[in-house]
Image (cartoon, helix red, strand yellow):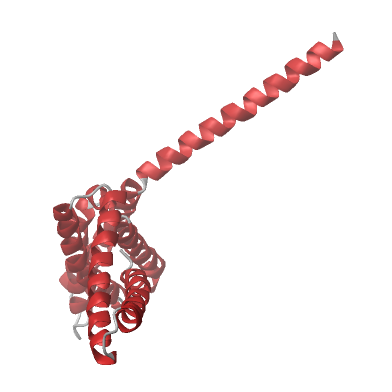
Amino acid sequence: MNQFLVFLSRMFVAIPSTFLVWLLSFFAFDQTFFLSGAISIGAGIIAYWISGIVLKQRFLKKHQLTRKEYQYIKKNLEEAKGKLNRLHKSMLSIRHLPTLKQRVEFTKTTKKIYYLTKKEPKRFYKAEEFYFSHLDSAVELSEKYVFLSAQPKKTYELDQSLYETRKTLEQMSKMVEEDLYRVISDDIDHLNFEIDVAKHSIQTRKDSQNLIESRRLK
């Protein structure tokens, strides 16, 4: 859920409610100015609270999630956000120009998975391998690489370890691309279905026009 938009929606309900209740209390029920203010503020708080419940229920219904499922996903996304920040920081700290483009793409892919999941929480179940395995491995490898590459004296063993780490991160990048593909697999299937429907409609129209044309020639 976009918390800023949710806040604006709740305020859009709460502020008019507060004003309306104050007018009713002061003019219709002949309450004092300050008592009307206190009553209206209370009504505004209640309206803000109820609107929050309604918006959350609509959100859960739209994405076909239970409250428990959403809390579980939300908790894991909050943990993942910290890991992603660490990953992106370490990826940008790696001083190896030949892999710069690959690291930038890797970073973009992980961000895409996170934001898609945050926008549509049910996608989380298609990205569990990313959140519970690939992300942790990528963070560990990239941070270890940054630490080792910062050592002043390089040895053959250290250079080999750095080389192997780069190769592993390259493989991880491909795995994360596959994670993204799984996350959007339903969208791809839906698009392919729509393309097939459109092609069928176009072909049907062409066949119909050809039939009409052949009848005219006869």
Horizontal side of 181 relative to 212 (left or right) equals left
Horizontal side of 102 relative to 41 (left or right) equals right
Horizontal side of 206 relative to 62 (left or right) equals right
Q: Residue 108 appears at what percent x and percent y?
A: 37, 65
Quadrant holding the C terminus: top right
213 lies above or below 177: above
Q: Residue 118 appears at what percent x and percent y?
A: 29, 61
Nearest the eye: 118 or 50: 50
- Can residue 177 be seen in the rendering of this structure? yes
Nearest the eye: 10 or 216: 10
Nearest the eye: 133 or 82: 82
**Count of marks, rendered view:** 0
130 lies above or below 36: above
Q: Quadrant of residue 210 in the image? A: top right
Q: Residue 131 appears at what percent x and percent y?
A: 20, 58
Nearest the eye: 196 or 109: 196
Q: Residue 35 appears at what percent x and percent y?
A: 23, 87
At 33% from the left and 64% from the top, the residue drawn is 111
Quadrant holding the N terminus: bottom left
Which residue, as the protein is rendered here, is positioned at the far right? 217
75 lies above or below 24: above
